Amino acid sequence: MRKAALLSLLLPLAATVQAEAVDMVVYPNAGVFDADGSRIVGPGADMLARLQMASGVQMSQQLMPIARAMQTVPHKPGSCLVALPRTPEREAQYRWAGPWATSAIGLYGGANETRHVEGPADLRGAQIAVLRESTPAAWLKEQGLTGHEVNDVTIGLRMLQAGRVDFWLGNDLAARFVIRNLSGPVPRLLYSFGRIDLYMACHLATPAETLERLQAGFDQLRRNGDLAEFGLR
């Protein structure tokens, strides 16, 4: 009888523990999220480890291209995507926690670039590399400009260094990580504007308690200064 009573008390707890776990989907970003064999490494992976400790939510990390990640998470209960701008079009597609990073949009030219860029008019006719499904990509479309969309910010930088595009447009914070991590000529920041706030975007069926724990974890990391590297103080 006592065993049955104890089991009845433990079952709800076990269900809660099981619910407090998410499959964290991240996309490649050199210097932030990198693959090292079967492991995901970098400051982004370290931040998620700290978030796991602060929130008590267990996390497994999975690396995939951003376009595939955005197709996967809305249809995969128990999963979240790091990191995504929170836009009106996406608001109802996910449940959100964060932010975990903030930055501006940066336009980069080659190391020896001499052109001056003061606005969209100066980009007419230019070849511009940009990350697919990103705020910079959306901005280009709003301005009536066409970007060469890539699945990985590293590809955009490599295209600029190889002279295959005129400019590279991206999240300035992510760009700095990539530039610091890769070799080759260092591009010039020509133009910086706007603001990008990046959030954790979770499947709509994610339990409210899990989201509350994740949000509390983010808040604690920010108070501790652990998110300063990602632009949040």
Image (cartoon, rainbow, N blue to C red):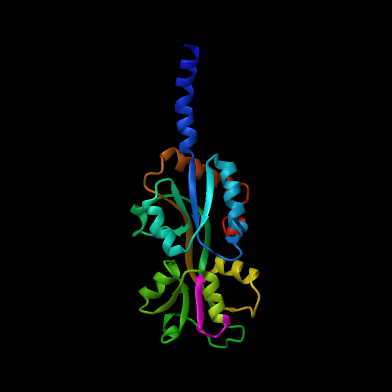
Farthest-out residue, top: 1
The image shows residue 85, relative to residue 221, as above or below, that is below
- Residue 208, percent from left and from top: 41, 40
User: Does the magenta portion include 169?
Assistant: yes
Q: Split into 4 quadrants, where in the image is the C terminus?
A: bottom right
Image: magenta residue range: 161-171
Q: Foreground: 11 or 197? A: 11
Q: How many marks?
A: 0
Left of 158 or right of it: where is 146?
left
The image shows residue 35, relative to residue 47, as above or below, that is below
User: Which residue shows up at 59% across the image and 52% down it?
Assistant: 47
- Residue 88, percent from left and from top: 35, 58
Left of 67 or right of it: where is 45?
right
Q: Which image quarter: residue 112?
A: bottom right
Q: Foreground: 95 or 14? A: 14
User: Does the magenta portion include 117?
Assistant: no
Left of 56 or right of it: where is 89?
left
User: Which residue shows up at 43% across the image and 69% down it?
Assistant: 132
User: Which residue shows up at 60% across the image and 48% down it?
Assistant: 49
User: Which residue shows up at 37% across the image and 77% down it?
Assistant: 143
Left of 113 or right of it: where is 169?
left
- Residue 39, percent from left and from top: 60, 55
- Residue 62, percent from left and from top: 51, 54
